[in-house]
Amino acid sequence: MYSSRDSTISGLYVDDDGSLLELTKRFIEETTEAIQIDTAQGAEEGLETLRTRRYDVVISDYQMPRMDGLEFLQTLREERNSSIPFIVFTGKGREEVAIEALNLGADRYRQKGGDPSSQYQVLTDAIRQEVQHNRTRAAREEREENLRITLDSIGDAVIATDSVGTIERMNGVAESLTGWARSEAIERPLSEIFDISAHDSGEPIPNPVEEVLESGSVVDLANGTVLHSRDGTDRYIAD
C-alpha cells in the first residue's frame, strides 16, 4: 500500500536515442531529487528491464525501430496486463498518434521540443501527477478490499447504503438471509432488498434508513420483525 510519505518515484525512460536518454535522466534527477530515472535503449530493452524491476511510471518515445512506443504500450497493457502509468514523450505530434496512444491506455501524451527547461518541467509535473493518481487509486482499492474481507468475516448480516438508501455493499450472510446476490442488489433501494414487516399485524415496516435520516439517531427494529426473503422464506430477525 502506498502512502503520502512514499515520496520517491522510480521511472523507466525508453528511447532509441542514447544521448537523449542521458540528457533526460540527468535533467530530471538534478532538478528533482524525489524522482529516480533508469533508461532503456529501445522498447525490447524496456520490456526486458520491466521483467526484473518494478517502477512507478514508464516514459516512452513513440518512433523507435523494430517496436514503436504504441506497440510497447500495447504489449504492457494487453500481454502483461500491466496498469503502470505510461507517458508517451515524443517529437511526433500527429493527432492520430496521440489519440491511438490514449485509446491503448496511455495516461499522458507529451511532445518534445522547444525550450528544454520548460519541456522537462512539464514532463516532471506529468510524472508526479500520474504516479500520485495511481498511488491514490491503489490505496483506495486496497481499502475497499480490506473492507470487503472484514464484512465477509462478520457473522451477522450487514447491508450498507448511501445517504438516500441505495445499497452500496452487503456481505455473504445478508445474501443468504435476503435471497439476493450482492451483484444484483448493489444500486437497488434498500426497501426492495430488505423487505420487512411486523409479525403480529403483517404490516410493512418503514425503511429504517429513512427513519435514521429523519431522526439522526440509531433506529432499532421491533421484536417480531419478519424478513421476507426473495425466495419466499420468512425469517424472524433481531438487530
Image (tube, rainbow, N blue to C red):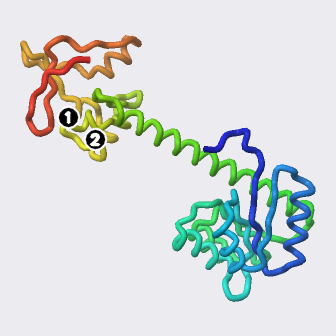
| Position above or below: 215 against 230 | above
Taking the image as shown, residue 203 lies to the left or right of residue 216, namely left
Disc 2 packing (10 Å; few <14; some 14–19; many ≥20): many
> Residue 46, which numbered label?
none
Q: Nearer the viewer, mark 2 or mark 1?
A: 1
Taking the image as shown, residue 103 lies to the left or right of residue 69, namely left
The amino acid sitting under disc 2 is Ala
Q: Mark 2 falls on what kind of element?
A: helix
In the rendered image, residue 145, in percent from the top left (x then y), is placed at 46, 42
In the rendered image, residue 165, in percent from the top left (x then y), is placed at 34, 29
- Marks 2,1: beta carbons within 8 A: yes
- The residue beneath circle 2 is 185
The residue shown at (7%, 13%) is 200
The residue shown at (41%, 38%) is 149
Q: CA distance from mark 2 to mark 1?
A: 10 Å
In the rendered image, residue 42, in percent from the top left (x then y), is placed at 74, 80
User: Which image quadrant is residue 228 in?
Assistant: top left
Q: Mark 1 falls on what kind of element?
A: helix
The residue shown at (58%, 43%) is 139
| Position above or below: 93 against 128 | below
In the rendered image, residue 95, in percent from the top left (x then y), is placed at 67, 74
Q: Disc 2 or 1, which lies upstream in sequence?
A: 1
**Which quarter of the rendered picture does the N terminus lie within?**
top right
Count of numbered badges drawn on the protein: 2
**Which quarter of the rendered picture does the C terminus lie within?**
top left
| Position above or below: 182 against 197 | below
User: Which image quadrant is residue 167 in?
Assistant: top left
Looking at the image, which is closer to me, 53 or 3?
Answer: 53
- The residue beneath circle 1 is 178
Looking at the image, which is closer to me, 118 or 19?
Answer: 19
Taking the image as shown, residue 143 lies to the left or right of residue 124, namely left
The residue shown at (73%, 82%) is 63
